[in-house]
Amino acid sequence: MQLQHPDRILRIRAVLALTGLTRSTLYRKMEAGTFPKNTRISTRCMGWRESEVSEWLNSLETKETAVSPRA
């Protein structure tokens, strides 16, 4: 039996550290629809679901391996 871990909410500093993006690039990618949207935690607090950020990072790895190396 596999235990389910709750989906953590990551704050902006954690997301920037995980992705290596700058704050402005992160918001530009969200606006373009190429990065997961943030979720309101409280009136003045936003965060991102850890699972969605992980999926985005995994999709980058998949795209990198799909591109054949130059000869």
Image: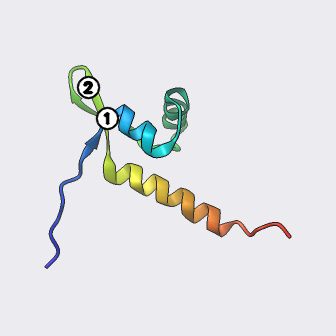
Labels 1 and 2 touching (C-beta < 8 A): yes
Q: Residue at x 15, y 69 (%)?
A: 3
Q: Is residue 1 left or right of residue 8?
A: left
Q: Is residue 25 left or right of residue 8?
A: right
Identified by mark 1, the residue type is Arg
Does residue 26 sit above or below 65 in this rendering? above
Element type at mark 2: strand
Q: Is residue 32 left or right of residue 68?
A: left
Does residue 18 sit above or below 55 in this rendering? above
Element type at mark 1: loop
Scheme of image coloration: rainbow
- Disc tally is 2
Q: Residues within 10 Å of mark 1 (few under 14, many from 20)?
A: some
Residue at the extreme top: 44
Mark 1 lies on residue: 11
Identified by mark 2, the residue type is Cys
Image x and y of residue 30, in percent:
48, 36
Q: Name which of mark 1 and mark 2 comes first in the sequence.
A: 1
Q: Residues within 10 Å of mark 2 (few under 14, many from 20)?
A: few
Mark 2 lies on residue: 45
Residue at the extreme right: 71
**Could you say which quadrant of the image residue 66 lies in?**
bottom right
